Image (cartoon, rainbow, N blue to C red):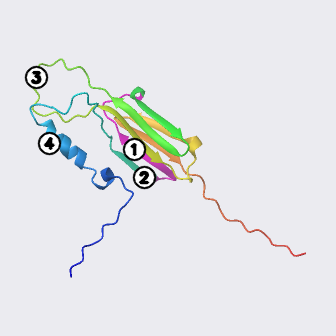
Amino acid sequence: MRLTPVLRRTDAAPSSTFPNVPRIFDEFFRDWPFHALDFDRTETWRPAVDVLEKDGNLVLRAEVPGMSEKDIELKLEGNVLTLQGERKQEAENDNGNYYRKETSYGKFSRSFTLPDTVDIDKIKAEYRNGVLTVTIPQKPEVQPRAIPVSTH
């Protein structure tokens, strides 16, 4: 008798397991001469984000080229940092015909749960050359202290 392997269910979203699937479908249908499925569609995109630890800080870098700092919003609710904004498409005055158009426009929103080890009161953000850098200082490590035990 042959056994079938058991598939374990995870709480991970399908988009995190197969992150390129939406992009693959978008690219496939983008090349069609008509877009029957695009009626009333609000195009969205997800900027690439790197999160790293450097010099005692958590650093979040988001690639958001073609935007100004006025188009970007950072919000902190509890320990959830949300980056959102909108990259607006400029009015096209050229009369050229596009053979391929890969630039994405529209609204985006990314949320990150911050660990308890960061100092949320000292978060700083800087936007330069199409990259938003958010620096989140970590709290100093709590050192254990000895508590003397007395006898009566």
Using the image, determine if residue 36 lies above or below residue 122: above
Q: Nearer the viewer, residue 147 or 83?
A: 83
Element under disc 3 = loop
Residue in the image at 43% along x and 43% along y: 111
> Which quadrant of the view contains residue 27?
top left
Mark 3 or 1 closer to N-term?
Answer: 1
Q: Which residue lies furthest to the bottom in this view?
A: 1
Q: How far apart are marks 4 and 1 (CA)?
A: 29 Å
Q: Label for residue 8?
A: none
Mark 2 or 1 closer to N-term?
Answer: 2
Q: What range of the chain is rendered magenta?
A: 54-69
Instruction: Name the residue that disc number 1 marks.
Output: 61
Mark 4 or 2 closer to N-term?
Answer: 4
Disc 2 + disc 1, Cβ < 8 Å: yes
Q: How far apart are marks 3 and 2 (CA)?
A: 42 Å
Using the image, determine if residue 128 lies above or below residue 89: below
Mark 3 or 2 closer to N-term?
Answer: 2
| Amino acid of disc 3 | Gly
Q: Is residue 25 left or right of residue 57?
A: left
Quadrant in which the C terminus is drawn: bottom right
Element under disc 2 = strand
Residue 80 at x, y percent in the picture? 50, 44
Q: How far apart are marks 2 and 1 (CA)?
A: 9 Å
Residue 31 at x, y percent in the picture? 11, 37
Q: Residue furthest right?
A: 152
Q: Which of marks 3 and 2 is in front?
A: 3
Instruction: Name the residue that disc number 2 marks.
Output: 52
Instruction: Name the residue that disc number 4 marks.
Output: 28
Q: How far apart are marks 4 and 3 (CA)?
A: 22 Å
